[in-house]
Image: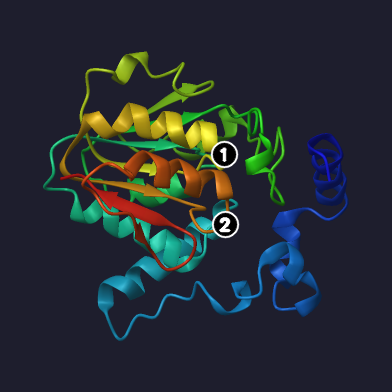
Amino acid sequence: MSLFPKKNFFWVFDSLLPSKHLLKFRKFLFFEPFLGNDIANRGKLSHYGNAERKAFAKTLKKIRSETELLLEDIEAYHIYMAVKRTQKVPGDIAEVGVYKGGSAKIICSVKEEKHLHLFDTFEGLPKVEDIDLVWPFYEGKFAASFDSVKAYLKNDRNVIFYKGIFPDTSEPVKEKTFSMVNLDVDTYESTKQCLEFFYTRMSTGGIILSHDYLTAPGVKKAFDDFFEGRTEPILETAGSQCLVVKV
């Protein structure tokens, strides 16, 4: 199927049956071609009696009641722990791909006094190339209200917003270093540009975490290409994420 018809097919299908609703019925096998045959069985966060995990589960439940969060429970916990474990690493925190602010809220719950820089178009995905075109990615998908997200995070300290296409919006942070960066940008070009910008600005021991490494071919290719000749290994996590620790 050529790029143009494929884009329109995804748009029409997602308009009739939005992915956020379809995910609620992921246990039914006839959705496997769109969702992956393992999604019904992944993403649960086992606590093993651990008090911190139990507390995080309560926080996560509250966030899910407040806004739409397109992450499995265990993916959300990976973000939480990446922020917590890099508290001792110098630098700010950044997120590219904010959507409705759910993952930013997770970061805010544990970042303490660190500054969090949030980058998003707030108009959905920009240009989508052929490699990126897997359901439900298409141009304009994942748009969110800038004002609503700002209002949702208004009580969290040291949160700065940058509206527009990254890295065009990166000028204010070019002289900063980072301890943790969370990427959820879905496409090859956006992921590549994020890695090119943040890699040299990561403190030693800092973590770059990305969603969709296993489910978005463009994201995987961008990471694999970028780190092919570099020291750091790419670690696949549970769910669809990957992470890299700067050495």
Residue at point 44% right, 57% down? 241
**Picture residue at 32% right of the left edge, 72% below the top:** 53
Q: Quadrant of residue 170?
A: top left
User: Is 202 in front, or is 24?
Assistant: 202
Specify few, some or many for label 1: CA neighbours under 10 Å numbering under 14, 14-19, or 20 or more: many
Observer-nearest residue: 57 or 71? 71
Residue 130: image location, x then y, percent: 69, 38
Q: Residue at x 53, y 20 (%)?
A: 164
Q: Are marks 1 and 2 in contact (CB under 8 Å)?
A: no
Task: Tell me: 86 left or right of 96.
Answer: left
SS of the residue under disc 1: loop
Residue at label 2?
Answer: 215
32 lies above or below 224:
below
Give the numbered dot on residue 187. Answer: 1
Q: Quadrant of residue 246?
A: top left
Q: Residues within 10 Å of mark 2 (few under 14, many from 20)?
A: some
Residue 70 visible, this orientation: yes
Relative height, residue 88 to residue 196 (above, below) = below
Between residue 156 and residue 47, name the one nearer to us.
47
Distance of label 1 from label 2 (alpha carbons): 11 Å
Mark 1 and mark 2 lie on one chain; the one further toward the N terminus is 1
The number of numbered discs placed on residues in the rendered structure image is 2
Q: Residue furthest bottom?
A: 49
